[in-house]
C-alpha cells in the first residue's frame, strides 16, 4: 500500500481466443479485488463501465493495453497504475493505486469524498467523485464510523474545484489536516463514538478570544438532544509556539469520549469540560 492510496487488482475472467495469431481478451467480464481499504462503491462501478466499454482487447496489438491504462489513469480517483503484466489465458492483471478518502465536503444536498495528496511541505487535498446523501460511512457495526465533514467548502463558487482538482480554500485545507490527524490518532471504535463530525477551521480565534479556533462539532448520543463540541485550537499545520502537542490533544479527546461530555476544551495541559456548548 502506498500512502494516500488503496491497492486494487483487476483481472479479466474471459477465456483466451486465438485470432490473427494474437489473444482476444473479453473486457466485459472482469473482477476487482481490494486490499480491504474502503472506497466509494461508485468507483468500482465507474471502473467496470469504462472497461466494459472497451469490450475487447487484442493483446498483440501495439499500444492496446497502454490505451486502456491511459483511460483508467485519467479517472480522478486513480493515482497511478503499477506493473501491467499480461497473464495468459486470463488477460491483464493491473495494480491500481487509488486516492484514499479521509473526509468529505457538502455540495448542495450531496456529500463528496476528499483525499490528501502527500506533500511534506504543505497540506494538499483533492475533491473526488462518489456522491452520498449523507457523510460517507466506513465499516459497519461497532467499528463503523463516518468520514468527517469539512466546513467552509463553497461548491457553488466560481473557484470551486472540479473532481480531481485540488482544494484551494485555506480553512478547508486546515480542516482536512485535522481530519488526517484524527485518523492517525483514533481507532475505528473511538471514531464510532464521535458519530457524525463537522470539522470547522474557519475561525482564527476560539470562543474565549484566544488564537486557534478550530473545533469539532459532534452529534449528540444517547439521550442528548444537542450536539457536542471539541475546542481543538490550531490545526496541526497551523500550530505555533506554545501550542499543546497534538498527541496530548487527542489523548484528551479519547478520554472525553470515554467519560461523556457536552463540550470539552483540549487546548491546555488539563482538559476543561463545560456543561453547555459554548
Image (tube, rainbow, N blue to C red):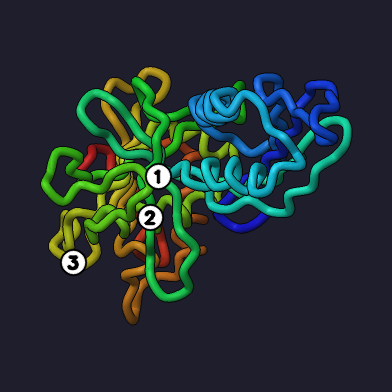
Residue 237 x, y percent position in the rendering: 37, 68
Q: Nearer the viewer, residue 101 or 181?
A: 101
Asked if marks 1 and 2 touch (Cβ < 8 Å), the reply is yes
Instruction: Return the disc, 2 or 3, that comes first in the chain's sequence.
Output: 2
For label 1, the SS is strand
Q: Nearer the viewer, residue 276 or 5?
A: 5
Q: Quadrant of residue 263?
A: top left
Q: Determine whether, in the image, residue 147 is placed left or right of residue 243.
A: right
* Disc nearest the viewer among 3 and 1: 1
- The residue drawn where x is 39% and y is 31% is 196
* Disc nearest the viewer among 2 and 3: 2
Q: Nearer the viewer, residue 259 or 89?
A: 89
For label 2, the SS is strand
Q: Quadrant of residue 225?
A: top left
- The residue drawn where x is 79% and y is 34% is 91
What residue would you read off at disc 2? Answer: 125
- The residue drawn where x is 24% and y is 64% is 212
What residue would you read off at disc 1? Answer: 114
- The residue drawn where x is 64% and y is 48% is 63
Which class describes the residues within 10 Å of circle 3: few (<14), some (14-19), or many (20+)?
few
User: In what quadrant of the picture does the C terminus appear?
Assistant: top left
The numbered mark at residue 156 is none
What residue would you read off at disc 3? Answer: 210
Q: Is residue 10 visible?
A: yes
Residue 149 x, y percent position in the rendering: 34, 39
Asked if marks 3 and 1 touch (Cβ < 8 Å), the reply is no
Whether residue 84 is situated above or below residue 121 in the rendered picture: above
Instruction: Return the disc, 1 or 2, that comes first in the chain's sequence.
Output: 1
Residue 96 x, y percent position in the rendering: 64, 46
Amino acid at each position: 500500500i502506498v500512502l494516500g492510496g488503496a491497492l486494487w487488482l483487476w483481472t479479466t475472467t474471459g477465456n483466451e481466443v486465438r485470432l490473427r495469431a494474437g489473444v482476444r481478451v473479453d473486457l466485459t467480464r472482469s473482477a476487482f479485488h481490494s486490499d480491504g481499504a474502503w472506497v466509494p462503491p461508485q468507483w468500482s462501478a465507474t471502473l467496470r463501465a469504462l472497461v466494459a466499454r472497451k469490450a475487447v482487447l487484442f493483446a498483440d496489438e501495439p499500444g492496446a493495453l497502454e490505451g486502456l491504462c491511459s483511460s483508467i489513469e485519467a479517472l480522478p480517483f486513480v493515482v497511478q497504475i503499477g506493473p501491467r503484466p499480461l497473464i495468459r489465458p486470463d488477460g491483464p492483471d493491473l495494480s491500481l493505486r487509488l486516492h484514499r478518502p479521509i473526509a468529505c465536503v457538502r455540495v448542495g444536498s450531496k456529500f463528496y469524498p476528499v483525499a490528501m495528496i502527500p506533500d511534506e511541505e504543505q497540506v494538499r487535498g483533492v475533491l473526488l467523485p462518489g456522491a452520498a446523501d449523507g457523510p460517507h460511512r466506513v465499516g459497519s457495526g461497532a467499528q463503523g464510523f463516518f468520514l468527517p465533514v469539512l466546513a467552509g467548502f463553497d461548491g457553488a463558487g466560481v473557484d470551486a474545484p472540479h473532481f480531481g482538482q485540488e482544494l484551494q480554500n485555506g480553512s478547508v485545507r486546515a480542516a482536512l489536516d485535522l481530519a488526517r490527524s484524527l485518523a492517525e490518532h483514533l481507532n475505528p471504535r473511538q471514531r464510532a463514538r464521535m458519530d457524525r463530525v463537522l470539522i470547522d477551521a474557519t475561525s482564527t480565534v476560539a470562543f474565549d478570544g484566544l488564537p486557534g479556533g478550530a473545533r469539532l462539532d459532534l452529534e449528540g448520543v444517547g439521550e442528548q438532544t444537542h450536539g457536542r463540541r471539541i475546542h481543538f485550537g490550531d490545526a496541526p499545520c497551523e500550530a505555533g509556539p506554545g501550542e499543546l502537542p497534538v498527541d496530548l490533544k487527542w489523548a484528551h479527546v479519547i478520554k472525553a469520549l470515554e467519560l461523556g461530555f457536552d463540550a470539552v476544551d483540549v487546548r491546555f495541559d488539563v482538559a476543561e469540560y463545560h456543561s453547555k456548548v459554548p
